[in-house]
Image (tube, rainbow, N blue to C red):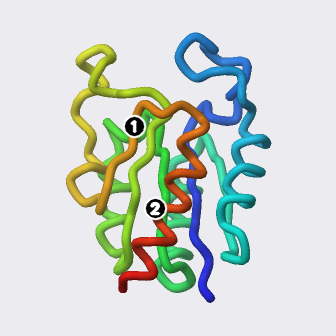
């Protein structure tokens, strides 16, 4: 059974402290634990980086090793053609995930590059949406 990669972009290491009125009080370590619990026996590769190139390297690993990618690209959602190009190479399902509803926020957050190739988009469920994304990915992978 191949793993599901859960990739997190810049500033998500600050969850629980960063703008709790938007992102809540749940830490990234707690998010990881929720993802692993939701996955059950399915292996999870959970990563976070503030560096675009590291995220691209993990996507490259996923191309060869993963059944699915759940990605919260954070600010790179709106700026990174390099991440978009890497994701285009992934043959399996991709879920774009956002803690907040990016469409209810300032206009700068409305144009996701990742949405153009994502299988599905989940936004606005808060950190508790991550396990939902994991279960949805397991279902998507199971249909293939």
At x 63% / y 14%, what residue is drawn?
A: 20
Image position of 38 (left or right of 33): left
Q: Crowding at label 1, few (<14), some or many (≥20) Cα neighbours within 10 Å?
A: some
At x 52% / y 75%, what residue is drawn?
A: 62
Q: Nearer the viewer, residue 54 or 100?
A: 100
State the image coordinates of residue 63 (x, y, percent, origin top left): 46, 79
State the image coordinates of residue 51 (x, y, percent, origin top left): 58, 45
Q: Crowding at label 2, few (<14), some or many (≥20) Cα neighbours within 10 Å?
A: some
State the image coordinates of residue 22 (x, y, percent, origin top left): 53, 16
Q: Nearer the viewer, residue 26 or 118?
A: 26
At x 32% / y 36%, what residue is drawn?
A: 78
Q: Nearer the viewer, residue 131 or 92?
A: 131
Residue 45 vs 34, above or below: the answer is below
Residue 40 location, quadrant? bottom right
The Cα atoms of the two marked residues, 2 and 1, are separated by 13 Å
The answer to which of marks 2 and 1 sits earlier in the sequence is: 1
Find numbered disc 2 in the image and state the secondary structure of the residue it sits on: helix
Residue 119 location, quadrant? bottom left
Q: How many marks?
A: 2
Residue 37 location, quadrant? bottom right
At x 60% / y 38%, what residue is drawn?
A: 128
Q: Which mark is residue 136?
A: 2
Q: Quadrant of the N terminus?
A: bottom right
Residue 76 vs 116, above or below: the answer is above
State the image coordinates of residue 91 (x, y, percent, origin top left): 35, 80
Q: Quadrant of the C terminus?
A: bottom left
Badge nearest the viewer, 2 or 1: 2
Q: Which mark is residue 43?
A: none
Find numbered disc 1 in the image and state the secondary structure of the residue it sits on: strand
Instruction: Name the residue carrying label 1.
Output: 123
């Amino acid at each position: 059974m191949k793993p599901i990669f859960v990739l997190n972009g810049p500033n998500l290491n600050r969850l629980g402290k960063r703008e709790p009125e938007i992102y809540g009080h749940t830490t990234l370590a707690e998010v990881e634990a929720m993802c692993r619990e939701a996955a059950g026996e399915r292996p999870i590769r959970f990563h976070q980086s503030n560096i675009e190139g590291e995220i691209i390297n993990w996507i490259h690993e996923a191309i060869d090793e993963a059944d699915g990618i759940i990605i919260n690209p954070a600010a790179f959602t709106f700026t990174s053609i390099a991440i978009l190009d890497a994701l285009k190479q992934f043959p399996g399902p991709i879920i774009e995930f956002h803690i907040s509803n990016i469409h209810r926020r300032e206009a700068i957050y409305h144009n996701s590059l990742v949405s153009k190739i994502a299988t599905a988009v989940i936004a606005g469920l808060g950190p508790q949406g991550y396990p939902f994304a994991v279960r949805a990915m397991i279902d998507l992978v199971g249909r293939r």
